[in-house]
């Protein structure tokens, strides 16, 4: 019989942790959250507003058997260790587990580890503690806020607009996208010209006239300048400076997501899924082991033990001259410094050594994390920067060059940074001080509008503004896209008509609440609760007294968007037919509802895709009970022909089944046939 039960969140953690702890421990998984707020009570919040926002928790669907098993195993052991993730959400899950298992304070201990390695896990079990109620209160306050805002604003949006949801962080992120698009729409391009002198082995660009800035705004000004230039240039000055090029901090969640997007073409969701797997454990030659530390963090700190071992590694492999120093971050007020940065669990576990055990994407992400961390503890690179000023009839031209004199951290990080030398000739040794240009050309340019947000840039903006937390960025990106509030065009967010509509509606009635400053201040309040410096009930009360009256006002005064007419009349009462929103998408119904409850049948309402190959019916677009689009025959149930991919109405030359579109490719719905 096991003496102790250890409960973790993820099933993939159980095997390595049980191996590290030995036979005296049994490790089981809660498979994530086990309880959530009910939908009972006022507005379905699952929160008693009148009784200090007391939450009403229920067992989540599918978790009844999990709890039953955990209760059974807890009765068999002397002690329970709650080892959920080392963040506020993990703390709250431990609190829920303690409650549902009926554990007294002397029956359990809370244990946290930042990485899943034998040393880290065993060390963590030497430093157990009790559940931190402040962390739990902070997380549960966040959950209650998100529930209240999400439920009330989503109901409002559904009643008044074509949108389907709104939220505390989601709506502010969408506003950033919409505001950026309006900047672009307002932008008026301005003409300007560049003048460039070409020499045999370098170029120089005009930047001054009589040592003052010059801007050439039109072709007339450009022609005047060109007329005054000759092909003879005087070397006015050659300035050489040595500079240090410092490495970057190790990754936090937001910077990892940004670099994975820019360098690996991963979206935020994919990045976090891969990072989660690397954290929870990979089966390698030495057994199952976590390859990286916890991936939800906004701290750039590295443990003293890791730094010491990495310094030894750098000295042994690259030489003492490459050993750097720990970077000290200018810590923001809202940074949670309980964790370390995202780093490899062992600097000796090189990407090349674990490559055979990783998928291609896992290897790419691990390699990027590994070398970013290694580089952060290496010496700065040193460069020699040269600036040359050339004079041509009182017009000054500038040329710049840079060469690397000591590679420093670039020894390992050159694949992730542009490190090409741009060398200038030794102009300071020229005796004549006169250069003759091969050609002088002018280029017309126009100022460019601000760039739209990529996922990486939006995450960076949210982090800098203090909106959301590391664990929320990927979810926020997903929701904005899934709700149809913005699309990705060339990897950049473009707000849809619905995105504009929702943002404008919310700003008209909730501008004091749905904005960057208020949302960032709310994160600060949550941090204060976590630190025991603020009372969560007071925070919720202050929020609700402003929020609910604003919702009531909007429910009363926000105009309801008229339903779009189809151009047809109802066959039963003659009123116009309109598009309505339902659980599984749009449908066509009578505008005279509820007096007339006519709904156009799915078969006649949906656009015909092609002829059915198995009967005389038509293939139409349908939705499954879960809302997923598929394509089926309108003669169902007599004909059960159906496809997940859109059919094209042609038969496969190999098997006579339907050909379908899969992305840009045509393939058979049954066999392996594909068209080029």
Image (cartoon, rainbow, N blue to C red):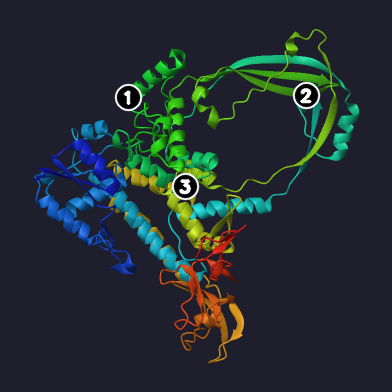
Left or right of 393: which side holds 500?
Answer: left
Q: Which residue is mark 3?
A: 268
Depth check: 622 or 181 in front? 622
- State the image coordinates of residue 113 (x, y, percent, origin top left): 27, 37
581 vs 21, left or right, is right
- Residue highlighted by disc 1: 304
Q: Of all residues shown, which one is farthest toward the front?
A: 654
Quadrant for residue 19, please give it. top left
Quick check: 394 above or below 554? above
Q: Earlier in the sequence, mark 1 or mark 3?
A: 3
In contact (CB < 8 Å): disc 1 and disc 2: no
Report, in whole angstroms, how far the alpha carbon at label 1 lies from the one at label 2.
50 Å
In the rendered structure, the answer to whether residue 302 lies left or right of residue 27 reads right
Asked whether residue 646 appears in the rendered view, the answer is: yes
Mark before the other along the chain sequence, 2 or 3: 3
Q: Is residue 377 above or below residue 280?
A: above
The residue sitting at 36% across, 24% down in the picture is: 307
The local crowd at label 2, few if under 14, some if 14 to 19, many if 20 or more residues have their Cα within 10 Å, is many
Within 10 angstroms of label 3, few (less than 14), some, or many (20 or more) residues?
Answer: many
- 313, 97: nearer the viewer: 313
Q: Which residue is mark 2?
A: 397
Helix, strand or loop at mark 3: helix
């Amino acid at each position: 019989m096991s003496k102790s039960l250890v409960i973790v969140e993820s099933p993939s953690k159980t095997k390595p942790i049980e191996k590290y702890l030995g036979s005296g421990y049994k490790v089981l998984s809660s498979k994530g959250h086990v309880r959530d707020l009910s939908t009972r009570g006022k507005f379905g919040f699952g929160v008693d507003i009148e009784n200090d926002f007391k939450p009403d928790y229920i067992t989540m669907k599918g978790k009844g058997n999990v709890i039953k098993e955990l209760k059974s195993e807890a009765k068999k052991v002397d002690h329970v260790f709650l080892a959920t993730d080392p963040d506020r959400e993990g703390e709250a899950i431990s609190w829920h587990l303690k409650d549902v298992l009926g554990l007294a304070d002397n029956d359990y201990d809370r244990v946290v580890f930042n990485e899943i390695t034998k040393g880290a896990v065993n060390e963590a079990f030497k430093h157990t503690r009790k559940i931190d109620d402040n962390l739990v209160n902070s997380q549960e306050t966040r959950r209650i806020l998100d529930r209240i805002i999400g439920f009330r604003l989503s109901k409002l949006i559904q009643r008044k607009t074509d949108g389907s949801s709104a939220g505390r962080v989601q709506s502010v992120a969408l506003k950033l996208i919409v505001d950026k698009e309006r900047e672009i729409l307002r932008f008026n391009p301005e003409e300007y010209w560049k003048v460039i002198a070409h020499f045999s082995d370098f170029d120089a660009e005009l930047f001054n006239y009589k040592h003052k800035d010059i801007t050439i705004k039109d072709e007339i000004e450009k022609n005047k300048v060109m007329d005054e230039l000759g092909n003879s240039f005087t070397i006015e000055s050659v300035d050489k400076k040595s500079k240090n090029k410092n490495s970057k901090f190790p990754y936090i969640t937001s910077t990892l997501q940004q670099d994975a997007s820019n360098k690996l073409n991963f979206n935020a969701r994919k990045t976090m899924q891969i990072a989660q797997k690397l954290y929870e454990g990979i089966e390698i030659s030495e057994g199952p082991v976590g390859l990286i530390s916890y991936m939800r963090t906004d701290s750039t700190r590295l443990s003293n033990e890791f730094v010491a071992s990495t310094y030894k590694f750098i000295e042994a492999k690259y030489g003492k001259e490459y050993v750097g120093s720990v970077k000290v971050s200018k810590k923001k007020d809202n940074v949670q410094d309980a964790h370390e940065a995202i780093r490899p669990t062992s600097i000796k576990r090189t990407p090349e050594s674990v490559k055979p055990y990783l998928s291609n994407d896992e290897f790419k992400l691990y390699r990027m994390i590994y070398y970013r961390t290694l580089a952060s503890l290496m010496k700065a690179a040193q460069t020699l920067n040269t600036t040359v000023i050339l004079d041509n009839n009182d017009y000054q031209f500038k040329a710049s060059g840079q060469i690397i004199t000591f590679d420093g951290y670039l020894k390992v990080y050159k694949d992730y940074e542009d490190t090409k030398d741009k060398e200038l000739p030794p102009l300071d040794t020229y005796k004549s001080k006169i250069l003759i240009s091969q050609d002088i050309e002018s280029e017309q340019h126009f100022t460019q509008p601000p760039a739209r947000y990529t996922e990486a840039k939006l995450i960076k903006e949210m982090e800098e503004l203090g909106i959301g937390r590391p664990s929320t960025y990927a979810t926020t990106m997903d929701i904005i896209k899934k709700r149809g509030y913005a699309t990705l065009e060339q990897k950049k967010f473009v707000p849809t008509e619905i995105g504009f509509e929702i943002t404008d509606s919310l700003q008209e009635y909730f501008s004091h609440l749905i904005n960057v400053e208020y949302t960032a201040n709310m994160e600060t309040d949550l941090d204060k609760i976590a630190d025991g410096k603020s009372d969560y009930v007071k925070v919720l009360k202050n929020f609700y007294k402003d929020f609910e009256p604003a919702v009531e006002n909007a429910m009363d005064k926000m105009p309801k968007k008229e339903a779009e007419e189809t151009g047809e009349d109802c066959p039963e009462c003659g009123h116009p037919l309109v598009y309505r929103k339902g659980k599984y998408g749009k449908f066509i119904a009578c505008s005279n509802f509820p007096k007339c409850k006519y709904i156009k049948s799915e078969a006649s309402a949906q656009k015909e895709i092609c002829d059915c190959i198995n009967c005389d019916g038509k293939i139409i677009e349908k939705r499954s009970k879960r809302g997923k689009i598929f394509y089926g025959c309108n003669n169902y149930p007599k004909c059960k022909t159906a496809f997940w991919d859109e059919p094209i109405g042609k038969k496969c030359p190999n098997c006579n089944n339907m050909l379908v579109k899969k992305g840009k490719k045509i393939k058979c719905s049954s066999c392996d046939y594909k068209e080029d």
